[in-house]
Image (cartoon, rainbow, N blue to C red):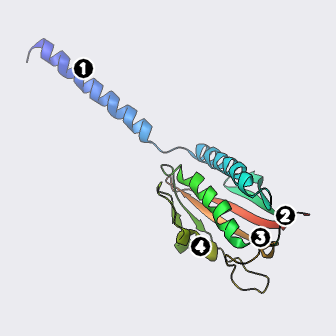
């Protein structure tokens, strides 16, 4: 092998090694701080988008965040509004926001029923998935029966649920959602 061929081979080998290193860095998962910042931004953007849709009958806000747990408040203004509005205006909007980050996030599930998880793979979530998700949250109407699309959202006041967000890194993050009356 000539000296020129050896140099060319060495340069090619160095180039391949450098490209492999750059690719491995690019594919490395984000760290916990970056995941927390991302989820916080998703939630803040989601709250703003949701509030544009529901501002006349409820308000969604981030109350507190402590490492892997976010406390979210849904303040209900119009207690007679049917539950289907919450299903689609709040849940669908937040899932769409999470789904936009499906490269980093895997799923969101009710803490008390992981089988109702919604996979975050970038595809559209069906209405049936949202209804199953909401049913698995364990929310009740005023009589103690399962919350339905026709249940007035005022029946949610005083209730709460926890949703678990699973990241591709293997970490779990928690959204604790509480429902209060507007006067609270």
* Picture coordinates of residue 69, whole percent (x, y): 69, 57
Determine crowd level at label 2: few under 14, some 14-19, many 20+ residues with C-alpha closer than 10 A. some
Disc sitting over residue 39 in the figure: none
> How many marks do you count on the picture?
4
Which tag is nearer the camera, tag 2 or tag 1? 2
Position in image of residue 171 (x %, y %) = 56, 56
Q: Residue at x 71, y 72 (%)?
A: 83
To which residue does mark 1 refer? 11
Q: Which residue is denoted by mark 3 in the rendering?
A: 81
Residue drawn at (59%, 73%), measured in percent from left and top? 131
Real-space Cα distance between discs 2 and 1?
A: 68 Å
Residue position marked by numbered label 4 in the rendering:
131
Alpha carbon distance from label 1 to label 3: 68 Å
Secondary structure under tag 1 reads: helix
Residue sitting nearer the eye, 53 or 138: 53
Q: For the residues marked 2 and 4, what is the alpha-carbon distance in whole angstroms?
A: 23 Å
């Amino acid at each position: 092998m000539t000296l020129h061929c050896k140099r060319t081979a060495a340069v090619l080998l160095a180039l391949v090694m450098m490209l492999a290193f750059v690719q491995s860095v690019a594919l490395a998962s984000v760290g916990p701080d970056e995941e927390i910042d991302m989820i916080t931004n998703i939630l803040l953007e989601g709250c703003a988008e949701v509030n544009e849709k529901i501002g006349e009958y409820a308000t969604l806000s981030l109350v507190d965040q402590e490492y892997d747990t976010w406390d979210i408040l849904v303040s209900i203004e119009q207690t007679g509004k049917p539950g289907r509005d919450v299903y689609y205006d709040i849940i669908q909007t937040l899932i769409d926001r999470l789904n936009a980050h499906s490269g980093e996030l895997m799923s969101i599930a009710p803490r008390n029923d992981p089988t109702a998880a919604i996979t975050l793979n970038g595809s559209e979530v069906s209405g049936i998935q949202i209804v199953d998700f909401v049913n698995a949250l364990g929310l009740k109407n005023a009589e103690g029966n399962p919350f339905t699309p026709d249940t007035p959202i005022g029946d949610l006041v005083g209730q709460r649920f926890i949703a678990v967000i699973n990241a591709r890194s293997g970490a779990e993050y928690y959204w604790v959602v509480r429902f209060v009356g507007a006067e609270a």
